[in-house]
Amino acid sequence: MYKTLYSILVFFFIFACSPSAKKRISLYNIADEVKEKNPVYFQGQEQYDSLISLIDTSIQFADFYSLEYADNFQNNKLVRGKSNQKNEIIQMELEETFKKGMQIVTRYYYSANLLFYVHQIVRDYQKTKGGYMETFTYFGQNKKPKISARKIANSEEELASKNYVVCKKQMFSPQEALDIVNQQGKYETRFQGSIEAERLKFILVGTSGEMKAQSAVAYNHDFPVAEELVKNERFYLNRPLKIEFTKTTGENGFSYQALTRIFILDED
């Protein structure tokens, strides 16, 4: 178990706030022009593409990061994204890294809490042919896909030069990414024990069992709640916690998640 959980300690996150959005954005209130024109698949797509470009390039939104979770097989998942002044998600990116040599990055775009576009890149480094795939879906206001397109290649360079081909409509549920961000469901931050590495002490949070997902967060003497959990580990095991953290890099370049606030929650 410790070998599996130790692998997540080399990954890190930082919460950095940018100036907040001054106004609500929508598909029908876009002044920015898309610098690079995409093929037009349906009427009104230009409004979608303008909003996507604005979200990707604007500095008016606040950045957020989730904890990084690892499972029994040393596969890792994390979410990063952007939110507006009302704490509404504008963009959310789920990054999945698999021990077998695959990476999946799925980016979700929102307007007024409505998912309107998803873009996904799959990199399967074990495949000699067709290991790189890029897919997108535009969604209508009825939350159903309007159109999906895809391209497949043998390398990153070839993928960039290929054109998309319309394919069967893809749904792309954002639920897992939302669970990771909100520390809920499979990604609840329940106390699962403690470890030490690089002369640092960590509490382990997440879920247990065959389908577990866990994360390691460093603590020190400034956090008596964490010390109490570790001291009486058997008593507190599997108790729900609320975790807040930041990114920290040690003198030796070792990067990790560092605790900033912790609460023991009551069971529902």
Image (cartoon, rainbow, N blue to C red):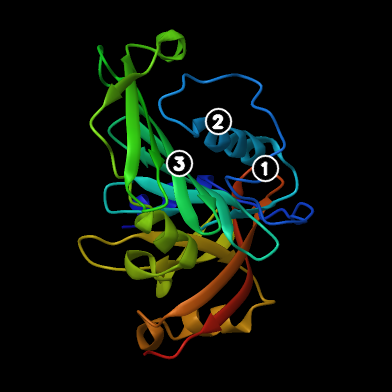
- Which secondary structure lies at badge 1? loop
Task: Give neighbour class at mark 1: few <14, some 14-19, many 20+ (Cα, 10 Å).
Answer: few
Q: What residue occupies the far left of the structure in this picture?
A: 210
Measure the C-alpha gap from mark 2 to mark 3: 13 Å
- Residue drawn at point x = 31 percent, y = 57 percent: 1
Does 5 sit left or right of 89 as displayed?
Answer: left
Tag 3 near tag 1, CB within 8 Å: no
Measured as percent of width and height from the top left, residue 130 is found at 26, 16
Task: Give neighbour class at mark 2: few <14, some 14-19, many 20+ (Cα, 10 Å).
Answer: some
Say the numbered circle drawn on residue 252: 1
Q: Nearer the viewer, mark 3 or mark 1?
A: 3
Image label count = 3
Amino acid type at circle 2 is Glu
For disc 2, the marked residue is 46
- Which secondary structure lies at badge 2? helix
Does 169 sit left or right of 238 as displayed?
Answer: left
For disc 3, the marked residue is 117
